[in-house]
Amino acid sequence: MRILSKSFVRATALGLALLAFSCARLLPWRNDQPSPEVNLSFVLENNLVRLQTVRLDGQPGRYILGSAAPRTVVAPPLAATTTVQITESETVNVTPSTLDLRGVADAIIGAEVWRNRAISIDYRSGLVTFQEGGIQTGLMKLYTYDVEPMIYVKVNGADVAAIVDTASPDTLTLPSRNAGRGTVRVEVAGSDFGLIDVQYANVPTARIGNRLLSRFLVTIDYGKKMVGLWRDPRIPLTEP
């Protein structure tokens, strides 16, 4: 029998308490006067956040959320793209970069679309929420960053800076001259994932992807340059 960590037990108890107060949504910052917000639906497709309602120049496509991309990136057929339509009433002008995305997606929606607003990613509900006035941080574990959204994770007991990258379908990508995979002990925002499979690649900074991020409710405030993580007790700590 697996022994649950104290952090998991506390998170589960917290989730049940919040659920007793509100059966509509389980959000750590929910209060009596929430900020105006817009919800965008998504599906987790191949461990990537595919935004279902976003349009580029009015056209649907396989558009994934790129939390760490400063600019929207499009495949060559969409090189002439000039607008990203977030909702029926809101369209953002963009000057995207062009990159061969190798069929993984038609475009990666970058941070310039959200400008100085905050977004939250609720993996269980399949919603990306963005707010004009920032987020209420509530009970979240908070991190500040300078350039790209970043948190600190523990890898074999050592603190490692990791970029929050929703365009990564993996667990964790660690810098190494030798590409490959390995097993390390990982702790994120106080939750111990134990020994997990990670990727090694020639990258300057570690990157945390959706296989770990999906265990949390993730918020990124691009205006305040802040990341918040809340361990979602509705989602198992590890994959079955």
Image (spheres, helix red, strand yellow):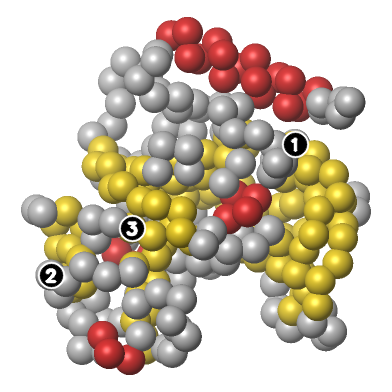
Quarter-wise, where is residue 216 in the image?
top right
- Judge whether residue 191 can be spotted in this image: yes
- Residue 104 appears at what percent x and percent y? 46, 76
Residue position marked by numbered label 3 in the rendering:
51
Residue position marked by numbered label 2 in the rendering:
58
Distance from disc 1 to disc 2, alpha carbons, whole Å, reads 42 Å
Q: What residue type is labelled 3?
A: Leu
Q: Which amino acid does label 1 sit on?
A: Gly
Distance from disc 1 to disc 3, alpha carbons, whole Å, reads 29 Å
Q: Which residue is rendered at x = 81% and y = 53% of the image? A: 196
Residue position marked by numbered label 1 in the rendering:
190
- Residue 184 appears at what percent x and percent y? 87, 57
Q: Which of marks 1 and 2 is nearer the N terminus?
A: 2
Q: What residue type is labelled 2?
A: Gly
Q: Which residue is rendered at x = 70% and y = 41% of the image? A: 240
Q: Which residue is rendered at x = 27% and y = 70% of the image? A: 61
**Label 2: few (<14), some or many (≥20) within 10 Å?**
few
